[in-house]
Amino acid sequence: MTLRQILVVDDQDLLRELVQMCLEDLAGWETMAAASGEECLQITQTKHFDAILLDMSMPGMNGFEVYDRLQSNPKTQAIPVILLTAKVLPSDRDHFEKMGVAGVIAKPIEPITLTEQIAEILGWDE
Amino acid sequence: MRVAGLAEDITEQQKIEQMKSEFIGIVSHELRTPLTAIKMSLGLLKSGIYDKKPDKFQRMLEIALIDTNRLVNLVNDILDLERLDSGRAVLEKMSCQAADLMQKAVEGVQPLAISQQITLTINPTDAEVWAAADAIIQTLTNLLSNAIKFSPTNSTITLSAEYQTDVVLFRVSDKGRGIPADKLETIFGRFQQVDTSDARQKGGTGLGLAICRSIIEQHGGKIWAQSTLGAGSTFCFTLPLSPEEIA
């Protein structure tokens, strides 16, 4: 099993902790956390990640803005981004697809299948 | 004239509808976040992965409990505010000693203050106010809890009251981080914390000051905030004197 490095970006402390626990304890992946979009952009400057789980609704810089910034930076544009969001209408899905995100996972998150969903989106053979 | 009146009514109605839908939008977000955490922590517990890891098992329960409390507080505050604003909560007013109300509120928040090493001092007045005691204690408790949350350790919070011409002026002063001038008024609105991360870090529901304002206005009083950034804030409100005091 490859050791995966995932960055979890969410402004809600407890949710972030729970997502990290899912990834670490169910799949054995390594995780780091960012509590804001700003922090995400900072961390990705110095560390490499195999994927970013990005919450859409955050105060300050929201998920869309963070995604745009990641995309416009050659250093981070190749990192697959999965959006975590409560808003997943069919029109949202189209919009997300056009944006080029790797995938979308709807909140409330199913903890037991979360890592399987991520692996499937990213084509990881775990 | 009648047409103009009707048009105004419709605009007013539309405004109310818009406010309602904004409120429901925010409430559903505020409800969904703790519900998501509860669902995830219980789901992980049920999966059995932490059956042999007591620390993590305990942490899952703790998270579920923290967010259950958050939901309970939020639902209570929403109901309180709805009862006050719809006029369904009739505040039965009577003559009350201002000093008694202050003492009771301080006793209630004392454990929280001690846990943060904050000293509460009272400068009471012997004036009597015309008030619904429980509602005023709730208001004072709310203002004192906020002051404690935003105060540095080892600082002092002062609760004072003074007799003015026809009202009693209450003040809760802290030495916290202060409030920017452009937020002094908006913080009394629903879900309008100074910093959006406050609800999460300080544990508030974002409705406390809206409840305080509603209670004070139903007493015919006024409530407002004064602040110097970096030096502290003072929340003030007035209550009418008891009719006996005026006579």
Image (cartoon, coloured by chain):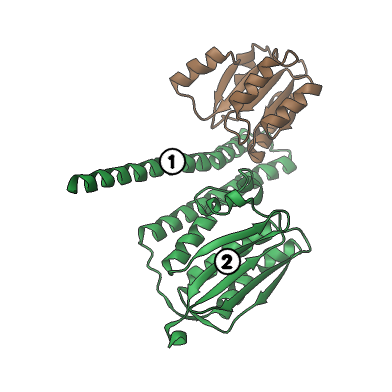
Chain colours: A brown, B green
**Foreground disc of the pair 1, 2:** 2
Image spot of residue B152 (x, y percent): 75, 58
Residue B147 image-quadrant placement: bottom right
Residue B86 image-quadrant placement: bottom left
- At mark 2, the secondary structure is strand
Image spot of residue B156 (x, y percent): 74, 67
Q: Is residue A47 above or below residue B65?
A: above
- At mark 1, the secondary structure is helix
**Amino acid type for the residue under numbered disc 1:** Glu
The quadrant the N terminus of chain A occupies is: top right
Query: Which residue lies at the image location 38% right of the left edge and 41% below the top edge?
Result: B18
Query: Which residue lies at the image location 66% right of the left edge and 42% below the top edge?
Result: B60
Nearer to us in this view, B60 or B16 = B16
| Tags 1 and 2 both on a single chain | yes
Query: Which residue lies at the image location 52% right of the left edge and 30% below the top edge?
Result: A86
Image spot of residue B30 (x, y percent): 52, 42
Q: Which residue is mark 2?
A: B236
Dot 2: few (<14), some (14–19), or many (≥20) neighbours within 10 Å? some
* Cβ atoms at labels 1 and 2 below 8 Å apart: no
Dot 1: few (<14), some (14–19), or many (≥20) neighbours within 10 Å? few
In the picture, measured across the screen, residue B126 lies left or right of residue B28, that is right
Q: Which residue is mark 1?
A: B22
Q: Is residue B29 above or below residue B236?
A: above
Query: Hey, which residue is sitting farthest front in the picture?
Result: B1
